[in-house]
Image (tube, grey):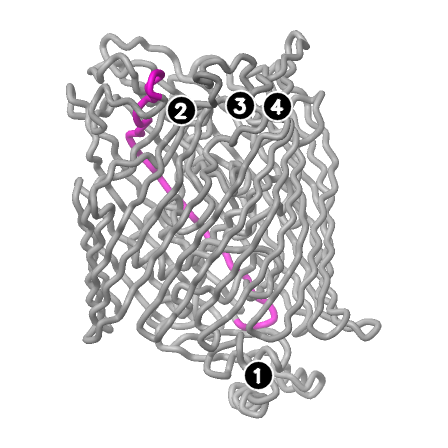
Amino acid sequence: MKSLTIWGDVDATARIVSSFNPRTSSAGVILPLGALLCGMSLSASALAEDSIEKDQTMPTVQVKDVAEQEGGSSDGYQATSTRVGKVTQDPHNIPQAITIVTNKLMEEQQVSTLREALRNVSGLTFNAAEGGRSGDNMNLRGFYTFGDIYLDGIRDTAQYNRETFNLEQIDVLRGAAAMLFGRGQAGGVINQVSKIPKLYDFNRVNLSLGTEDYREATADFNKKLGETTALRVNLMGRHEGSWRENPVTGAEPEINRGGIGASIATGIGTNNQFTLSQYYLKTDDNPDYGVPFDNATKRPTEKFPVNYFWGIDQNFDESETSITTLTHQYRFSRQTELRTTLRRSSYDRAYWASAPSNTTPPDADGNSPKTRKTDTENLALQSDLSTRFEAAGMRHQLITGLEYLKEDSDRWGLKNLGTTTAPIYTPDDVSGPPTTYSGNNYAFYIQDTVEFVPDWSVMLGTRRDQLDAEYSSLTSPELDFGEWSWRTGLSWKPSAESHYYLSWSDSFSPTADLYQLSGGEYPPERSQVTELGAKWLFMEGDLAFRSAIYRADKEYERNTDLESTAAILTNKRRTDGIEFELAGRITPDWEVFAGMALMDAEILEVAQNRNATTGVVTSADPRLQGQRPRNTPDYTFNLWTTYKLGGGWKVGGGLETKGERLVYNPSTTNANSLFTNGQFNPNTAEAYQRWDAMLAYEQKSYTVRLNVRNIFNETYYDALYDNGGFAVPGPERAFILTTEFKF
């Protein structure tokens, strides 16, 4: 049975109780039933009785559901709760586009990594590794997300490869979000939501085997330790080979990863709750840089077979991530809550990878090495206060908070040990002293949402960030920025099933993305996003559909390594887009998750680069004005759907498709190589379609599931090197058989 604790007014409680559907129920109709169930679940404590007498409301309601007792997700493909807006909300009520990838969706697709999970997010594309940014590296609505990845609302800034075994869901808040999260980009925020302890026992173990030596084991154990205390432990170990290999040595890209996520919570469902968690992830991969582009065809090379791998066995990508978090939630009343989080995180990573060549086939030496070593230590303190009240006859939902983030990072290159004998590098083979970064970010914010007349509300929020940082690099200035960010929106909710909104938000980034050269003579990057959207609920709330049309502008775009002297890539660019998304149940047996994004992106003003050493200013080629920015296709579409056939059998399948994507350096001063007969002709990854399928047999105590990826074995390129040198092909056809045990 599922245990759901609801803090709120009687209307909210009544909505939950009615058919376990909080969105579409009429509170006036089911209030007597809700009140009756509230009374039946009252605590016998004097504190609870006093609260009822004073407020005439029930502070805690517990609703039971079998699916979640067994460790599953009760929401299916449609999430009904998120904290991406700093407080617990139904995403249907947020006046901004949001996509939520649920745990059930990830399970049925046999998703293991954050990157694979984000294939379900329309308008998102993948960048390949380079420039110290290897790891999870995405574009959203055409804008970078390097510094916009979060874990439970706190910046998860280091560049590493993230796993999903300890995640309950992934929230993608689209659009500028600096008012809520601080410095960032125009595309949006990717927030990972960790699994937390529950007040009931369940155990789940998954064992998977697949082609290309795929082996994975995961476990999810939850134990109730007391009336309000529980412990949860998640474990993961995985090995993956590849269909690509070095024809000389037989070396192939590999993934070897293991991790643990453990958390203990006490005071669950009370006014005073503490949660302590520890997350640890270790990776030991052989990285894949993909294949080069052909300078003549402007497409991925066909001079060598696509399954050729230029790496060698001595290549490595090793990392250790450790994150310790303490969270305290204190509820002063049913309307007011204070949530404080303290986190210490450590990220150590080193890699040595062989780059591919368009002229030289793979060999045993692994030429053109790409190397990096980084050690990052972060300390974050975040405190959020939320309250509801009435003033001047209007309802208010006020949130305010303080944040502090301390970031320290050291970065090295690795020594050149030569290539003729394929030397064995180690993470300790650093070259000289590190480039260091030390930053302190202080922030406060306040936002109020006011229902000024029935069904109409306005939201207004502001945030102040003060960033003080120092680089050791001579070409990198000290950073001392104080910036305001804003967010506003107008909402009309004529019924529980419909929400129409107009919103505006902005963001800033003085460092382009974390630890990058700022260029002190330039103002911070600024982004503004205007969005008009609608959200509807159908099938008595079981099916959610949303649509949004937006304009996103970004100025003074910077994206360059610390060692570089040029910092501005474009002075201004824009993405106009429209999105559609469908999530939930069409019938009790038929579920669907689908999204489509249409994007019209354009460089409005070309870069003006100032050499940090000489001060010389050079302008990018003026012909680049009006061109489509990098890795921003005209369209993306994703679909996943399943149907229960009866007798425990379930069948499913899906499609991922993206339009062609361009890759080039938009700050180049002479772009002759990008034009052919006067026509813009940069390196291009062709449009592709990837089809997947699933067949499952589900019983109460076990499930057997077969996943088939890339059914038609299409060759496609899903990750692109930032400046256009390489493209990484997606996996060929793969089969994965998973058995899940529940006890």
Residue 323 drawn at (x, y percent): 47, 45
> For the C terminus, which image quadrant?
bottom left
Which one is earlier in the sequence, the residue at label 1 or at label 4? 1
Residue at 21% across, 37% down: 241
**Sequence-first disc among 2 and 1:** 1
Name the residue type under label 4: Val
Which residue is denoted by mark 3 in the rendering? 666
What amino acid is labelled 1 in the image? Ser
Do the CB atoms of the residues marked 1 and 3 lie less than 8 Å apart? no
Q: In which quarter of the image is residue 513?
A: top right
Q: Is residue 311 visible to us here?
A: no
Residue at 22 percent of width and 39 percent of height: 732
Whichever of labels 3 and 2 marks the residue nearer the N terminus, that label is 3
**In the image, which disc is placed on residue 683?**
2
User: Farthest residue toward the right?
Assistant: 392
* Bounds of the magenta segment: 269-297
Residue at 43%, 17% in the rendered image: 676
Q: State if disc 4 and disc 3 touch (CB < 8 Å).
A: yes
Q: Distance between the residues labelled 2 and 4?
A: 19 Å
Residue wearing tag 4: 606
Image quarter for residue 620? Answer: top right
* Real-space CA distance between mark 1 and mark 4, rounded to the nearest whole angstrom: 54 Å
Return the residue at label 1. 26
Q: Mark 2 and mark 1 in contact? Answer it, CB < 8 Å.
A: no
Mark closest to the chain's N terminus, 1 or 3: 1
| Comes first in the chain, label 3 or label 4 | 4
Foreground residue among 600 and 213: 600
The relative height of residue 728 versus residue 368 in the rendered view (above or below) is below
